[in-house]
Amino acid sequence: MIEFLFAPDDVARVRFAFSPLWELMHSLRVLADPSRRALHLPWVRAVRPRLRGLDLTPLRALVPASGYMPDFLTPPPESPLPDFAAELARVRATPARRVAVEIRDVGKDAEGPAFRAPSSAEAFVRAGTDAAGLRARRRAMAEAPERALGEVADLIAAYWEAALEESWPRMRALLEGDVLRRSRALTERGAEGLFAGLHEAVRWHGDRLAVQRRWHHHGPLAGRGLVLVPSAFVWPAVSVMTPPYQPMLSYPAYGVATLWETAPAAPPDALAALIGRRRAALLLALTVPASTTELAGRLAVTPGAISQHLGVLRACGLVTGHRVGRRVLYARTAAGDALAGAGGVVDEDALAEGR
């Protein structure tokens, strides 16, 4: 069990961020064992051909399907909107001694099924990647940490380009939408509202945050605050970093089940009859907040048309806009959520009769 103890001013130091590098590391776990993360199978199928010829053995040695991975591979985000190049530069700057120590810690927390050599992802099946081979690879890397760090960093860059760079805008939109939603909950209902529904393993107890994990930590935040990191690939679990690192909790982003959808579902006839089919589709597409450009791409209409429909929905109090960095994201209001949720059960006969 992990328990973060909150002093009265610690809630004010809770902040959100997301991390391309964090997503990358957890995507490796998805490839290592897709059956446990079936939500991402469309992505797995798409990236397998791109990874042919890329030997991921050094990363497989450091990132098992579950359990500990070296902390230097997942530095807590320093800004709310970090970019991949900046995060990779932080990895490259890791002191060699720390690299060696953390590599030696991989695999100590468990042995057995959780650390079995995965066989379901073709891109990860390579000669010599059995458990004994991976242990031997880690030993060699720990003995030459500077060389290992350079090799791993170069491989991370190649893997990003092949597997994630194209998908990152879609993932970033999902993560930004989650931050908007959680920030609103924090503003309206405080810490209890923020942590309620974050994940079944997370519980708020008034002055402490408990996270169900197999390992233990109990201590104050000591003025450092807590960084909340929504993630796509961490699903269905949560992940935690504790002091001496910046305390951090990563959790599945709201709406992650829609991440790989290729087209929005058709709106219910009742909702379409009430506000128009295009506006109904737009309202349903805002399961997670999105920008005008993203909505235009998903609904196959022009950004200008999206802006006009959003204007009507905003005037009706069904959506609202929020600026995140240089972009404006649109989200459903509580009234919009209620209408979208009830859209499939409206009495169509009553609607046609004007009742």
Image (tube, rainbow, N blue to C red):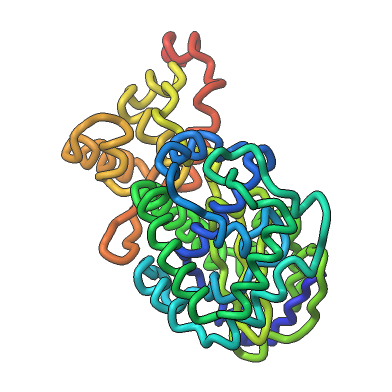
Residue 317: x percent and y percent? 38, 45
Residue 171: x percent and y percent? 43, 50
What residue lies at 46% left-to-right and 69% top-to-bottom?
151
Query: Looking at this view, is 321 or 92 the one in front?
Result: 92
Residue 214: x percent and y percent? 82, 64
Answer above or below: position of 211 versus 94: above
> Is residue 123 found left or right of 139 in the rendered image?
left
> Is residue 141 found left or right of 93 in the rendered image?
right
Query: Looking at this view, is 268 or 144 the one in front?
Result: 144
What residue lies at 54% left-to-right and 33% top-to-bottom?
341
What residue lies at 58% left-to-right and 39% top-to-bottom?
121
State the quadrant of the N terminus.
bottom right
Residue 282, picture quadrant: top left
Residue 170: x percent and y percent? 38, 47
> Is residue 338 found left or right of 213 in the rendered image?
left
What residue lies at 42% left-to-right and 57% top-to-bottom?
176
